[in-house]
Image (spheres, rainbow, N blue to C red):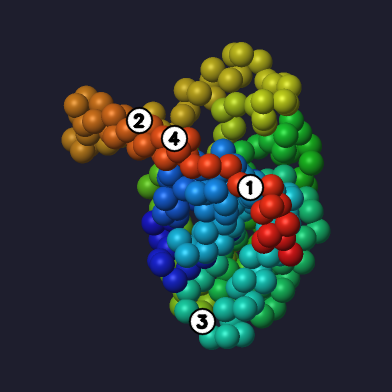
Amino acid sequence: CSALTDADQLLTGGRSIGPALARGVEPGRAMAELLGRTDGINRGKAGRGHMSDPASGFFGAHAVVGGNITIAVGVALERHLSGKSGIVAILFGDGACGGGSLHEALNIAASWRLPILFVCNNNQLSVSTPRALALAPRKLSDLGLAYGIPSRTVDGLDLDAVADAASTAVASVRAGQGPSFLEFTSLRLASHSTTARETRSRAELAALWAQCPIASYQKALTARGFLNADGIAELRRSVDAAVASAVAFADASPYPQPAEALTDVW
């Protein structure tokens, strides 16, 4: 998101909270949305899976796997036809790469040189299905290359590498060079959901947690002299305060009235 501007729009899948906050959605309104309150960005009707705030540059989440990709191409097409500035970025997981919607979207975006950046977060698992058992390409970025789209695979656990790759790809799209495709390889450190059975052993999970990118970057910043123990403690305090403030805002917001059930339904 650091590579995007106010004129750009970001879309994502059902895992929307991190991308929404990174894009600048106000935390209190995001929390109110999660709790189904009227002060939420969508008056409590969208929840985690479908929240949106285009005014913040967060066009929205779409919980249908792969369904968000074609919507993003539609947003990019509208910008292309209307001559609007700004680009579109779409986040999706490796699970979406087996769907026909991605291939259709890549084909249209490449054919019409649309201003869109495809970003695949490859965390190696689609619910509990390992990526290697479900997807044939050696690298998922090869999917973009098949359509003549500039594509790269990047270590998604390396924050500096992610930021650099995003900046380079966004610059290309913004310059009118057509779409780009980034695959960020990452890890999922928890089960798919609270209702999904964890299929990995405790030993496997412990090894994955040892690669936590937040902890790794904290160590790197400390080694470079940008952080110390006091700075880390202050960061944690500021985050805790921001979360508490968001929860208090959401708790003070009322639930929607039953009469609103059919408003904003299209």
Q: What residue is at 54 percent from the left and 20 percent from the top?
A: 207
First reached walking from the N terminus: tag 4 or tag 2: 2
> How many discs appear?
4
* Separation of marks 2 and 3 at Cα, in angstroms: 39 Å
Mark 2 or mark 3, which is nearer to you? Answer: 2
Give the image location of residue 28, x and y in percent: 43, 44
Question: Tag 3: residue type?
Answer: Lys
Mark 4 or mark 2, which is nearer to you? Answer: 4
Question: Tag 2: residue type?
Answer: Asp
Mark 3 or mark 4, which is nearer to you? Answer: 4
Give the image location of residue 142, x and y in percent: 67, 57
Q: Dot 4 corresponds to which residue?
A: 247
Q: Dot 3 corresponds to which residue?
A: 84
Q: What residue is at 42 percent from the left and 50 percent from the top?
A: 26
In depth, the one of 164 and 189 nearer the eye is 189
Mark 1 or mark 4, which is nearer to you? Answer: 1
First reached walking from the N terminus: tag 1 or tag 3: 3
First reached walking from the N terminus: tag 1 or tag 4: 4
Residue 240: assigned label = 2
Question: Tag 4: residue type?
Answer: Val
